[in-house]
Every structure is written in structure tokens, then in C-alpha cells.
Amino acid sequence: MPWEVQNGTLFAVGAMFTASAVVAFKRKATTPFKVAYFFAWPTLGSGTILLLQPDKDALEQKLRAKGLVDDASMGEARRLRAAQMEALRGSSKS
């Protein structure tokens, strides 16, 4: 996936929390360590996953080149994904 500001920022904030947790641990500062550790894993983990996942268009081109996907199956997948998202939006409003 190309570098995007949101993904890079999430990764950088996670790295900052991880570094803060290490510093707080070495200084035996219990409360700052707990706070930094609590925020380190969700931010650093999510940022890493978002940076490393493949770009949707590049993945689709690679699958088309291998003959694993055609236009009909991609259209069906998009339709099903749109229906799932609509169902999620509907359930969150009620």
C-alpha cells in the first residue's frame, strides 16, 4: 500500500507510545508505563497492518493477471460488500 498520511501517522504515534512505554518501564514509572503500553499496541499494530496491506487496485490487477478473478466475480464481490456495509450502517443507526 502506498504511504498515506493517516497510516503513517498512526504508525508514528504507535512508535512514540512504544518508546514512551520503554522509557517509563526503565524509570519504574508505573502509571505512565500503563498508559503508554495501553495505547501502544492498538496504534502501532493498526498502523503496521495498514502500511503493510496491499493496495486494493494492485491486488485486483495481480489476481486478474493470474486468471483468478474476472469482471463478473468482481462485480458480485462489490455488490455483496456494498450490501454488507449497508446492513452494518442500518444496524448501527437503530
Image: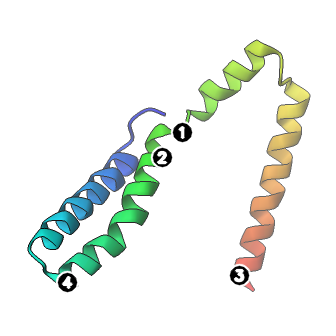
Q: Helix, strand or loop at disc 4?
A: helix
Q: What is the C-alpha distance between the residues marked 3 and 4? A: 40 Å
Residue designated by label 1: 53
Locate residue 54, reporting x and y percent: 56, 33
Q: Residue at x 13, y 81 (%)?
A: 29
Residue designated by label 3: 93
Locate residue 44, reporting x and y percent: 37, 56
The numbered mark at residue 50 is 2
- State whether residue 50 is above or below residue 30: above
Q: What is the C-alpha distance between the residues marked 3 and 2? A: 27 Å
Mark 3 burial class by Cα count in 10 Å: few <14, some 14-19, many 20+: few
Q: Helix, strand or loop at disc 3?
A: helix
Number of marks drawn: 4
In depth, the one of 47 and 34 nearer the eye is: 34
Query: Identity of the amino acid at label 1?
Result: Gln
Locate residue 17, reporting x and y percent: 25, 64
Mark 4 against mark 2, which lies toward the viewer?
Answer: 4
> Is disc 2 in contact with disc 1, using a CB cutoff of under 8 Å?
yes
> Is disc 3 in contact with disc 1, using a CB cutoff of under 8 Å?
no
Query: Identity of the amino acid at label 3?
Result: Lys
Residue designated by label 4: 30
Q: In the rendered structure, which disc, 4 or 1, sits on the residue that comes first in sequence? A: 4
Q: Residue at x 26, y 55 (%)?
A: 15
Q: In the rendered structure, which disc, 3 or 2, sits on the residue that comes first in sequence? A: 2
Query: Identity of the amino acid at label 2?
Result: Leu
Q: What is the C-alpha distance between the residues marked 4 and 2? A: 30 Å
Query: Identity of the amino acid at label 4?
Result: Thr
- Residue 43 found in image quarter: bottom left
Taking the image as shown, residue 3 lies to the left or right of residue 93, namely left
- State whether residue 1 is above or below residue 9: above
Q: Quadrant of the C terminus?
A: bottom right
Mark 3 against mark 4, which lies toward the viewer?
Answer: 4
